[in-house]
Image (cartoon, rainbow, N blue to C red):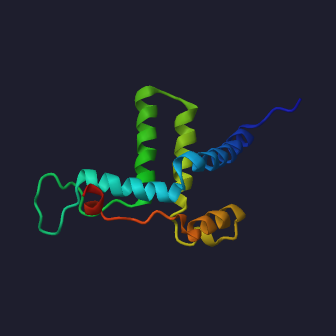
Amino acid sequence: MTEITNAEKAAQLPKEIGEVIGERNGTHGDPVDNHDHIADLWSAYLGVGQEGDSTAHNLLARPLEGHEVADLMILLKLSRKHVGGMDLDHYRDTIGYAAIAALYVPGYMDDGDESLDALRNYRQEGAVYENQNAEEIVD
């Protein structure tokens, strides 16, 4: 029996994470649409200040974007690792959030990858969440 190397073990994780993201698309929705929606909700909750507005409850200078939600979720998972200890789930989730953030990179969706083409087609067929500004969500 051949032993699996550390490099081979590490290479298995992205495939596993890709499968999980695909499975969760059914329960969590499209990952980009979901993160854009979360950004709208978090922006509304934290409050987005207008130029010259010194209202204390407005914590953000501008609305969050979906890729920033993924970045913040990575930080959340790293915090859990540092406070709660080593757990493979923290790293799996971090890889998953990094993969979702990568979907926002300009040109990434244009590399000819079939799975990315399927995601692009899904979004072009009208399944895209229409972003609302923070005020519309609160109202």
Q: Please state which of residues 87 and 122 is positioned toward the viewer in this rendering.
A: 122
Q: Which x, y percent locates residue 68?
A: 40, 56
Percent of width and height locating residue 116: 65, 64
- Image: 77 above or below 115: above
Residue at the (30%, 58%) spot, across then down: 137
53 or 137: which is nearer to us?
A: 137
Q: Is residue 51 left or right of residue 63?
A: left
Residue 35 position in % (x across, y down)? 45, 55
Picture residue at 70% right of the left edge, 70% below the top? 112
Quarter containing the C terminus: bottom left
Rendering quarter of residue 99: bottom right
Q: Nearer the viewer, residue 94 or 49?
A: 49
Residue 101 in view (yes/no): no
Residue drawn at x 63%, y 72% is 110
In the rendered view of the protein, which quadrant contains the N terminus?
Answer: top right
Q: Is residue 56 visible?
A: yes
